[in-house]
Amino acid sequence: MNILSRFAAGAVAVLTASSIFAGTAVLRAAAAETKQELIGYYGDISGDLEVDWLDIFLMEDFLLYGTEEDEVLWQYADLDDSNSVDARDLTLLMQLVLNGEKGTADYREVPFTEELIPPPIQALSPTMPSVGEARVLMVAVDFPECEHDAKYTAEYLQEMCFGAENPQSPWYPVESINAYYKRASYDRLNLTGTTYTYTASHYCDYYAGKAELLMVEVLGALDRQIDYREFDVNKNGTLDTLLLALPKGAVGRDANKDGTQDWWPCSGSYYTSSKFDGIKPGNLCIGAWDLEDVPGFNSTWIHELGHAMGLPDYYKYVNNEDGYYGLEGHAGWEMMDDAYCDMSSFSKLMYGWFKEDEVQIYTGGTQTFTLESLQKTPSCILIPRGDLDGFYSEYFMIEFNSVEGNDTAWFAGGKSYTPFWRGGVRVLHCNAELWNGYWGIELKWNNYGQMYDTSNQKQRVLRLVNNNHDFFRNDAVIDSSIDGFAWYDDEGNRTIDPGLTIRVSDFADGSGCTITISENA
């Protein structure tokens, strides 16, 4: 990836410029810490939230025989609030039943929680969970003729890859894999890992084109040392993921002379009958990278672990006159495209990192929304094209990006660069249709899919509206005159006018803005 050339082009652009939920019209404020929950009615002695003849029979038994099986429920028998249960309470209870009424409702304060949107990406059955807990088994593999530097012990790598967040680190925001994902997911994914070391039985070139052979060898050799069940957090009988980090000496090798590096980092599913502690391998991340390049190493595996959770690459596999990147320019940074910077609202939605009220859905007419910085707050707007179909459809997503958190910096040659000088609004064109592809259910328009157009001009999983241009800022107007603000037609071309106008106002750098969406007359 020639990120430096992309950065230079983006800088020139900036210098030139400076010379389905209920339609929620406004982003709701932070949820209250507690809410009122109904726990019962006075007169409901049985605990079924009804006041009926069963409660009368229970009270009669109590008054005649003194039975009292549930002290908590019997508090609802004291209808006259006399701190005792007697014939007066029975009379009041009978009146409620005969009148078809219930006594006073009893509420309690409980913590307020909202469920996350279930991860749509789960339809693809990725082996690694994207919400809650996930655990990486990482092994630094040496070969007889090339090894990692001796300082890269398992303990060293453990801290380097899975250490705690550290904003003071020179490698922030990729100071560790764990820290990056905690920020990207708003603490909704805790991706931990444990590192080991192993020396392979054969020379590096022996395993070229035989990644599965190396995988099975490593897992078998470490079987006595590792309980593999600990790396199957979701208990589906498959490792969440295995990461084999190969030494610098394996970089650039091409043993079979096919013009492709043998150990360029990649991620994919491997199918074998072998099981270890009753657990089968699933996704394998494997590749060679110089461990001296800490931000490059961590960024590479953050990107590949994104594949383990189900998302494809957003960049173009066929490099033509349109360039390599799927999302270009200052507004185009995305971890699953560049292997640097934050993930987009589309990626976060697919992984299940939003709650319902954090995805504001345009439902028609004129609506006004508030956007906050995606790097600080889960906040986005979605414009569907017809039925959302569980988010497996075509839609636009609007987000606000700021130079903070995972968008603070990217790295090349050991140096830190700012991805963009000022943030702002970007509009993403998303197409998450499903398809029964070569290996089962997949995103229909992914770069490896049967339906993908290798000219890169037609449907893609993710596009950037106004590609290779800067962010939208205050007073920006986005309509059909803006490049790429159009739905796909039946031939896969972007020609259908959405009939909408998006206006940006109340813009504040690093904070957010107001978005107004209206139907054109």
Image (cartoon, helix red, strand yellow):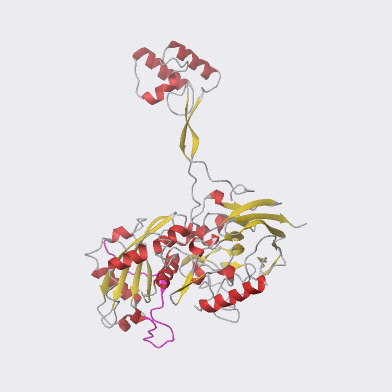
**Left or right side of 407 for 196:** left
Q: Residue furthest right?
A: 521
Q: Which x, y percent locates residue 107?
A: 48, 30
Q: Residue at horizontal 35%, vertical 66%?
A: 160
Q: Residue at horizontal 49%, vertical 34%?
A: 37
Residue 212: name its quadrant.
bottom left
Question: How many numbered circles are shown?
Answer: 0
Residue 426: name its quadrant.
bottom right
Q: Residue furthest left?
A: 224
In the rendered image, which quarter contains the C terminus? bottom right
> As displayed, is residue 100 above or below residue 224?
above
Q: Is residue 11 magenta?
A: no
Q: Which x, y percent locates residue 15?
A: 63, 73
Q: Is residue 260 magenta?
A: yes
Residue 151 shows up from this direction: yes
Q: Residue at horizontal 26%, vertical 72%?
A: 198
Q: Which x, y percent locates residue 370?
A: 62, 52
Q: Residue at horizontal 43%, vertical 83%?
A: 260
Q: Residue furthest top?
A: 87
**Left or right side of 356 for 142:** left
> As displayed, is residue 278 above or below residue 106?
below
> As displayed, is residue 9 above or below residue 61?
below
Assign the magenta stretch its main secondary structure: loop
Q: Magenta span covers which residues?
A: 251-277
Residue 387 shows up from this direction: no
Depth check, front residue: 136 or 156: 156
